[in-house]
Image: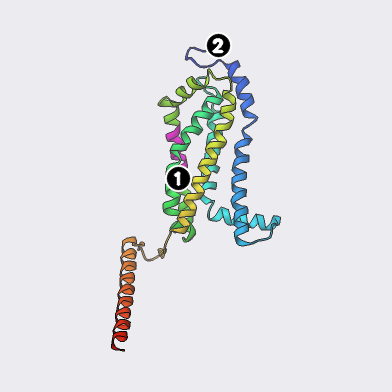
Amino acid sequence: MNATNVNGADSEPSCLESDTLLAKFTILRYAVLGSIISCRVWAQMNKDKKTCTPAEFFWAGCRFAMHEGVGLLIYFSTSAMMDNFSIFLVHDDAYCDYVKMVALYSMSLVTFLPNCWFAYRFQGRMWDSGELKWQILFGVGMVFMTMASFVVRLFLVFHLGWAKAIRDLLTPIPGKVVIAVLVPPIADALQSGLLILSSYLAEASKGPYVDIPDNEAHEYDAEAYHEESFTARSATASSFSRETYDEEDEEEEE
């Protein structure tokens, strides 16, 4: 039986063995992210009917990063740095690294959802159609949302007992390190898919964008736009109805 400290945590030797093995497989999550991004870039190349050359793949990757993948790249570049810092650099004798790994990444599936909403809601008008100042504001907003979600995740994991529940669940399992190796890539795959989808839908449904000039402060009025669109559709329908009735009258006269 493994020795435990006064807080009920695994002793340092038992953690050291499992955590050393876990650290060797952290690259797996980056391989999964790279594969997903490469697939999307490849699909974009096929859609554009581009030849498969390294240069074309590079430029397709740049186009992906500037549109469909912007939310994903901002989120993961910020989140990965904070995750690795909290797991490997912040030493907490209460939990082994494999416990922190599973607890943090499983909880991230919930706490990252505001980032999807932010990308879906604002990317179309602030990043895809906005000027440089709005693009910077969107990037800062995504970074802030990522950092805020990380702080909330730490609170839920370490202060509300999620890490303790994961430790109690994994400790009796012989393959706990294997579980800790697999959870981050699975979580990253789900997150990247949803973030790409959020950016894609934002680009498809962004609608018209009215930029704000330097000396004029006005905003895009979505309600007025939809009202105007409804009026235009009604006018078109009325015109079609009048033309239909005129044709029927001409046929009756003949």
Mark 2 belongs to which amino acid? Ala
In the foreground, 173 or 60: 173
N-term mark: 2 or 1: 2
Report x, y in % for residue 126.
Answer: 45, 57
Label number found at residue 3: 2
On whether residue 152 falls in the magenta region, the answer is yes
- Quarter of the image where the C terminus is located: bottom left
Vertical relation: 4 (above or below) 134: above
- Residue at the extreme right of the image, as rendered: 53
Indicate which disc residue 97 carries. none
Q: Is residue 232 above or below residue 48?
A: below
Q: Residue at x 61, y 20 (%)?
A: 16
Asked if residue 157 is among those painted magenta in the image, a careful observer would answer no
Residue 61 in sight here: no
In front: 201, or 209? 201
Query: Could you tell me which residue is drawn at 57 percent across and 54 percent down?
Result: 64
Distance between the alpha carbons at the discs numbered 2 and 1: 41 Å
Q: Which span of residues is magenta-colored?
A: 141-153
Q: Amino acid at mark 1?
A: Asn
Looking at the picture, how far across and down is residue 46, in whole percent?
62, 58
Q: Quadrant of residue 124?
A: bottom left
Instruction: Give the residue number, with chain letter if any, for mark 1.
Output: 115
User: Relative to residue 221, is residue 152 depicted above or below?
Assistant: above
Q: Main secondary structure of the magenta part?
A: helix
Which image quadrant: the N terminus? Answer: top right
Write the residue at 43% across / 58% down.
205
**Residue 33 vertical placement versus 252 (above, below):** above
Left or right: where 64 falls relative to 202: right
Q: Tell me the element at label 1.
A: helix
Residue 248 horizontal/vertical position (percent): 31, 81
Mark 1: few/some/many CA within 10 Å (<14, 14-19, 20+): many
